[in-house]
Image (cartoon, rainbow, N blue to C red):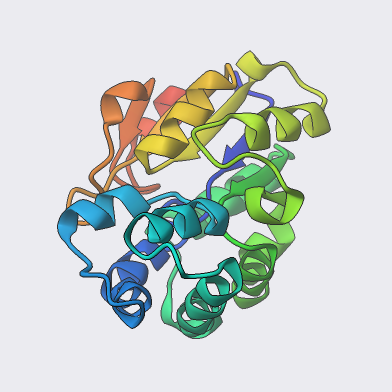
């Protein structure tokens, strides 16, 4: 394999939580009297809670961060505690990389608790993922700032060009590219509005046979 380590975004890359966020996130915005339009849905993809709260305040300045967190947590618990599933091909791919002793880590905008819930819910991820950073919990700037990825690359003790990052959102892809890593977009046209032209390569899921060519395996 031509890469020494793999970094995953979580939502929309490893798990299909974006599908459920799209179905349920309107509850958060409408609880504050904000209409959840398609334009707003595009803006919210890939945001951490701090940035989501900033966006809420553009419509409702009086909403506090604590109120925003409480609203999102209510929906998140439903999603990460059992609604979502692994993206097609993820289980086999993670197993293959784990057996090949390729380090795998997660860099996500989701809360640390949501990442931990996901790892507990899917044993293959808990076994294969050696480290995870939440931009929110670690206090990193949100994506498209690349800090979460550059910090993980430092943790992995490899060069940025030796890392492949899987992302699904425009903000995430920008962060991944800015880190200097090879970037692959996981693109589901039914769910994502991402600008995949940013990515080095694009796959539809981890069942996509092109992934082995991109990574120099098999």
Q: Residue furthest front?
A: 62
Q: Residue at x 48, y 38 (%)?
A: 166
Q: Residue at x 66, y 31 (%)?
A: 147
- Residue 193: image location, x then y, percent: 23, 44
Q: Which image quarter is the N terminus in?
A: top right
Q: Is residue 207 left or right of residue 65?
A: left
Q: Is residue 27 left or right of residue 85?
A: left
- Residue 122: image location, x then y, percent: 60, 71
Q: Residue at x 64, y 33 (%)?
A: 149
Q: Residue at x 51, y 71 (%)?
A: 68
Quarter residue 58 falls in: bottom left
Query: 4 above or below 111?
Result: above
Query: 67 above or below 46?
Result: below
Q: Is residue 166 left or right of residue 106?
A: left
Q: In the rendered image, is residue 53 in sight?
A: yes
Looking at the image, which is closer to me, 170 or 55? 55
- Residue 159: image location, x then y, percent: 72, 16
Looking at the image, which is closer to me, 140 or 103? 140
Q: In the rendered image, is residue 14 in sight?
A: no
């Amino acid at each position: 394999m031509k890469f020494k380590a793999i970094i995953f975004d979580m939502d929309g890359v490893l798990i299909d939580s974006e599908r459920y966020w799209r179905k349920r996130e309107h509850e958060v915005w409408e609880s504050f009297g904000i209409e959840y339009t398609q334009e707003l849905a595009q803006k919210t993809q890939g945001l951490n809670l701090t940035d989501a709260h900033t966006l809420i305040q553009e419509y409702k300045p009086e909403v506090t961060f604590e109120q925003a967190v409480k609203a999102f947590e209510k929906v998140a618990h439903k999603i990460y505690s059992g609604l979502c599933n692994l993206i097609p091909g993820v289980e086999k791919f993670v197993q293959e990389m784990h057996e090949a002793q390729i380090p795998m880590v997660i860099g996500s905008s989701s809360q640390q608790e949501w990442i931990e819930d996901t790892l507990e819910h899917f044993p293959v991820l808990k076994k294969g993922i050696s480290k995870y950073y939440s931009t929110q919990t670690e206090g990193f700037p949100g994506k498209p700032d690349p800090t979460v990825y550059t910090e993980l690359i430092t943790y992995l003790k490899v060069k940025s060009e030796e890392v492949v990052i899987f992302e699904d959102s425009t903000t995430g892809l920008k962060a991944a590219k800015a880190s200097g890593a090879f970037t692959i977009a996981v693109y589901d046209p039914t769910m994502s509005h991402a600008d995949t032209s940013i990515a080095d390569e694009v796959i539809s899921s981890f069942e996509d046979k092109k992934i082995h060519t991109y990574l120099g395996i098999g």
